[in-house]
Amino acid sequence: MKKAIMRNIITGTVKQVHLTMDHPAVQCGIAVWVDEEGRAYFPEDVQNPFYELKEIKEDQFDNDEGK
């Protein structure tokens, strides 16, 4: 499973997210980035101009929030 730190470039809010196919927002078999609360943001193959993603290794996911 791909995991990342997602930062909103306008507000500076940082969230831990992961890709999943197990969410109602999945369309046409394309995984979506979802946070720990289950909120979907955007599909894997779409670049969102309001967020930047930094993919991280699984052992970093809970430890340092990708910093």
Image (cartoon, grey):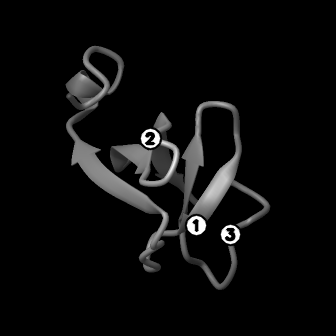
Image mark for residue 42: 1
Q: Are marks 3 and 2 in contact (CB under 8 Å)?
A: no
**Label 3 amino acid?**
Val
Q: CA distance from mark 1 to mark 2?
A: 18 Å
| The one of 28 and 9 positioned closer to us in this rendering | 9
**Label 2 amino acid?**
Gly
Taking 32 as reference, is 7 above or below it?
A: above
Total numbered labels placed on residues in the image: 3
Taking 44 as reference, is 61 above or below it?
A: above
**Residue, disc 2:** 12
Query: Which tag, 3 or 2, sits closer to the chain's start?
Result: 2
**Badge 2 density bin: few <14, some 14–19, many ≥20, Cα 10 Å:** few
**Residue, disc 3:** 26
Label 1 element class: strand
* Percent of width and height locating residue 66: 24, 31
- Which residue of the protein is positioned furthest toward the bottom in this rendering? 28
